[in-house]
Image (cartoon, helix red, strand yellow):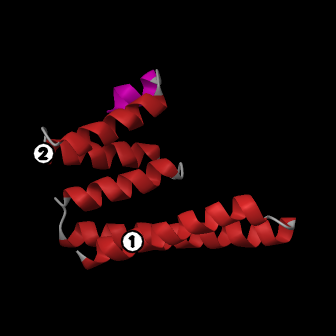
Amino acid sequence: GVMNNLASLLEAVAETTVANDNTLVSSKSKQANEEGAVHGILRDAARLYKRALEEDPESLETLCNYAGMLQEYALDEAKAAELLAKALSIAPSNVPVMVNYGVLMEDWGDNQEVAVKL
């Protein structure tokens, strides 16, 4: 839906800003300002993903995109796992959902505490 598309767009803006940060860092204050902007953009994207899930709580696209953002930027990997587990419960044979969940579990490695919570 529209909210998911807007959230994905904001996430892309954040990725572009991060990529530019890595090549154009000229001062600590500039870097701090850009990091603050990225965090603000990601907060806005998270808000839009939440709204999209309120409108369509079973949207695999939104569940996976939101989880991917949370994981990629290490914002909340437990929430990412929760979202992907929900996606798996909706579509247990969906290959992209299984791959995303597998990648998250691989990133966590042997973290038994996390595995027990899931």
Residue 53 in which image quadrant:
bottom left
Say which label, 1 or 2, has the lower sequence index: 1
Q: Tell whether position 80 is magenta.
A: no
Q: Which amino acid does label 1 sit on?
A: Ala
Q: Which amino acid does label 2 sit on?
A: Ala
Q: How crowded is mark 2: few (under 14 residues within 10 Å), some or many (20 or more)?
A: some
Measuring 37% from the left and 27% from the top, which residue is drawn there? 115
Magenta region: 112-118
95 vs 1: above or below: above
| Secondary structure state at the residue bearing disc 2 | loop
Q: Which mark is residue 7?
A: 1
Q: State how far apart marks 1 and 2 are (Cα).
A: 22 Å
Can the viewer see residue 109 in this picture? yes
Measuring 32% from the left and 73% from the top, which residue is drawn there? 5
Q: Which mark is residue 91?
A: 2
Q: How crowded is mark 1: few (under 14 residues within 10 Å), some or many (20 or more)?
A: many
Q: Quadrant of the C terminus?
A: top left
Residue 78, image x and y in percent? 41, 43
